[in-house]
Image (cartoon, rainbow, N blue to C red):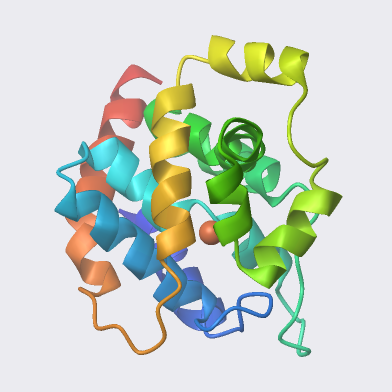
Amino acid sequence: MRLIDDIICRLTREGGRIYDGEAVNQLEHALQCAALARRESAPDALVVAALLHDYGHVLSDGGNTTGRRIAPRHEDVAARHLAAVFPAAVTEPIRLHVAAKRYLCTIDPDYRDALTPASRASLKAQGGPFDEDGVHIFKRSRFWGDAVRLRQWDDMAKVAGLRTPGLATYRGAMVALAERVAAVA
Ligand SMILES: [Fe+2]
């Protein structure tokens, strides 16, 4: 399926960039995140969400050569772009994964303390921890629980030099999910 191959090509081509001061590049981060989701037997939609949760950075980084760049509202950029291909079970956890970080920082000070320096810096730009209303609104989202799971894998998926299955491992799941969307369009 061409749309899926376009995504895989783009991730392969653009994913070598540094992930904003972390120990891994974007592609390594994506593959580690998806591998963690698979290891916990997450459904395919959530595995694909884990793989593509930072696709907004990849989309926005085209042409950039500095190696350090964070797309504004990258979660919205990715969710909007991928909604043409994948169901809400993929795009909603992606859209909510920054909100999930803000939520976890609110309810769990240990989580907040364990964030990497880069993630702590971006938290500030992302609005900081939620207030009570923010928590309430977040938990009204249908996919908030999936977003929290994704976020926890996201935070762990920053291990330099870790070997993981490659992108091709996920192509079948991506195609099956996209075909389901195409069938009802
Ligand atoms: Fe991430």
Position of residue 95 in the picture relative to residue 121 (left or right): left
- Total tally of numbered discs in the picture: 0
> In terms of depth relative to the viewer, which is nearer, 77 or 102?
102
* Residue occupying the point 47% across, 14% down: 142
Residue 84 at least partly seen: no
Residue 176 seen in this snapshot:
yes
- Residue 98 falls in which quadrant of the image? top right
Foreground of the two, 169 or 73:
73
Q: Examine the rendered structure and indicate whether residue 181 appears above or below residue 164.
A: above
Q: Position of residue 18 (x, y in %)?
A: 61, 83
Image quadrant occupied by the C terminus: top left
Residue 13, image x and y in percent? 51, 81
Rendering coords of residue 137 (x, y %) = 67, 13
In the rendered structure, the answer to whether residue 16 lies left or right of residue 165 reads: right
Determine whether 38 is above or below 91 in the image: below
Left or right of residue 136, residue 25 in this image: left
For the point 78% across and 22% down, which residue is it?
Answer: 131
State which quadrant residue 12 falls in.
bottom left
**Relative height, residue 8 to residue 86 (above, below):** below
Counting from the top left corner in percent of width and height, residue 172 is at 18, 53
User: Which residue is nearer to you in this view: 175 or 38?
Assistant: 38
* Residue at the image position 85 percent from the left and 52 percent from the top: 125
The answer to which image quadrant residue 88 occupies is top left
